[in-house]
Amino acid sequence: MSSEDKAETQQPERKVSSFKMIGRLLTFVVPYWPWLSVAILLHLVVTAMTFVGPFVIGLVVDDIKEGRYGRLWVYAVLTVGAAVLGGSLSLLRTWTHTRATGHAMWDMRAYVFDTLQRLSIGYHERESSGQIISRAIEDIRQVEGFYRMVAFMMVEIAVVYGAAISVMFYLNWQLALWSLSTFPLAIILTAFFAGRVRAGHFAVREQAGEMTTVLQENISGVRVVRGFAQEEPQIRKFEDKSHGIIDKVMVAVKLWTFHGSLVRVLVVIAGALTFAAGAAMVGARNAAIAAGAPKDTPIGLTVGTVVTFFMLQRQIAFRLRGLGRMVSHLQRAVAGGDRVFEVLNLVPEVTEKSKAVKLPPGEGRVEFEHVHFGYEPDKEVLNDITLTVQPGQMVAVVGSTGSGKSTLVSLLPRFYDVTSGRILIDGVDVRDVKLRSLRKNIGLVFQESFLFSARVVDNIAYGSPSAEFDAITEAARQARADDFIGELPEGYDTVIGERGVTLSGGQRQRLTIARALLRNPRVLILDDSTSSVDPTTEREIHETMMNAARNRTTFVIAHRLSTVRRADLILVLDDGRIAETGTHDDLLAQGGLYREIYDMQFRDDELRLADNGVIERPGFLSQENEGGQTP
């Protein structure tokens, strides 16, 4: 594998530091910094409005105590004005913040989806669909909590802590020390529990992915579940996974609840110390005044100042509890971010070279030159495959299960890259060709006839969205699909169910063949394309495919004799190696591996085709009737 074709083995660091993850998450907001800057500025102003209350209340207490009532209306106006201004700015802050973070979330979802589209087939085969869906939806939703709440809470906490503590030390540094004496311990406890809670949230996200996998498999395989009466076991399996989430959530909740209880106790102790120390200082001031000192003596504190202290401490305590909620949201976001970046940091196994070119015009000559391939480094699936297929030839690939048939044809569109050797189409190494150009010239009909929940015309034109309607109907006609499409309620505009469940197996297969033919590819790959149709339809499809194959090279993973007999070349694979090549008659005459496969797999198929008039009755039957030996 070339240096440009890196493997998807570069996993990201799992559970990186929270600060590093925050930096990664913030990169998605950077493009929208003007809106975010305005939102943060507004948030600073709104936060500053919260300091009006403590100071006003302190002044009110002192004025009432001293019998000064003339300024009370001023305090009322200040309080109401601060509330109105703060509320108005909060609305504007929410609008600008949502605009910035909403776009950031859209970018992240689009980036994740884009990455999933570009990751190699191998990743999607190894990773369960439930885990992929969980990462793309639920984990990103957890990350959204960071943008929606955590970022602003961090700003607010920093401002309140900085401003409130500064004011408290300015008013009286001794009382400030008493008021804040338990807060460092509360912060240490918060940091201590944060890491453990993060591990708990990560376990929750993993368990949620497993639950999603069970749900997705049950929905996709509903016919199998119902057919084998396995509803109850599936319900129990889903309930087990669901309860597993509850168990893991409870671990995190217990930790954080215990943390919250400790913090509340520390906050109450701080309040008690504030009142006790403040009362002592007020008493000292009153004693000094009673001894003849002036009322503006700097000794001790006024009652209003102590009240202001207490209100400021409440502000800090409220944010301290908010700090706990913020850390909880942050850890959920970081745990979700861990799983999201596991996807975003993957490097596809198959990548496009920087100097890749479009596939030049050609007739479809395909060459395998000493090709080796393995899904794992120490286990080869294909071994020294050397083969030349001339333009327009039809190659039937046969062999036992696990012999490498599907793997061989999967290398042509670069679903995987060869370990060594090379594959050429019209003299060009497929690794030197742009992926879009390469795959545009290869038509694919998979063993599973997958269709989208969309109109018939959209399914046929899926790989060729700009195709004219006449071309679409012609492809359908060639695939013998035009007749049954005309009988559908709305013809080509009929919306078929998810995965084509409203159609028969043969109808779905003919639509996928039409989809492949519409692209007019120079190379056609068929994976058991007639496995779900009746003999008459099979004959019609094969007649169509033979006509279509005249102008293009065709590879067929063959499981039916009707396919093998019409092939120009039969490729027999055995344990990843080419065991035999030749035509049907030649290989039968050789009496080798192909003859064994024929006796086990194709002989009954030949009788069926003969009985249905698809082929002539094989000669060995007449020999048997005459007492002769079968070949």
Image (cartoon, helix red, strand yellow):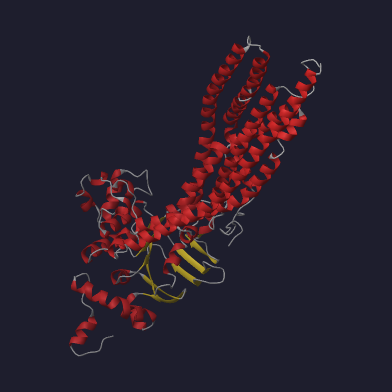
Rendered location of residue 388, percent (x, y): 45, 68
Q: Residue furthest bottom?
A: 627
Which quadrant of the figure has residue 289?
top right
Residue 393's place in the image compared with 481, above or below, is below
Residue visible at 56% across and 43% down in the picture: 329
Rendered location of residue 384, percent (x, y): 51, 72
Residue 196 can be seen, yes or no? yes
Q: Which is nearer the eye, 94 or 546?
A: 94
Where is the N terminus found, in terms of image quarters? Answer: bottom right
**Along the horizontal axis of the image, is 83 left or right of 527?**
right
**Along the horizontal axis of the image, is 261 left or right of 484?**
right
Residue visible at 26% across and 56% down in the picture: 507
Q: Which is nearer the eye, 454 or 56?
A: 56
Q: How many marks?
A: 0
Residue 309's place in the image compared with 191, above or below, is above
Rendered location of residue 121, percent (x, y): 47, 58
Residue 139's place in the image compared with 396, above or below, is above
Q: Residue furthest right?
A: 292
Q: Which is nearer the eye, 618 or 179?
A: 179
Where is the C terminus found, in terms of image quarters? Answer: bottom left
Residue visible at 29% across and 72% down in the picture: 561
Which quadrant of the figure has residue 319?
top right
Rendered location of residue 377, percent (x, y): 56, 68
Residue 512's place in the image compared with 588, above or below, is above
Q: Which is nearer the eye, 11 or 253?
A: 253
Residue 27 can be seen, yes or no? no
Residue visible at 74% across and 25% down in the picture: 283
**Along the horizontal axis of the image, is 213 left or right of 278?**
left
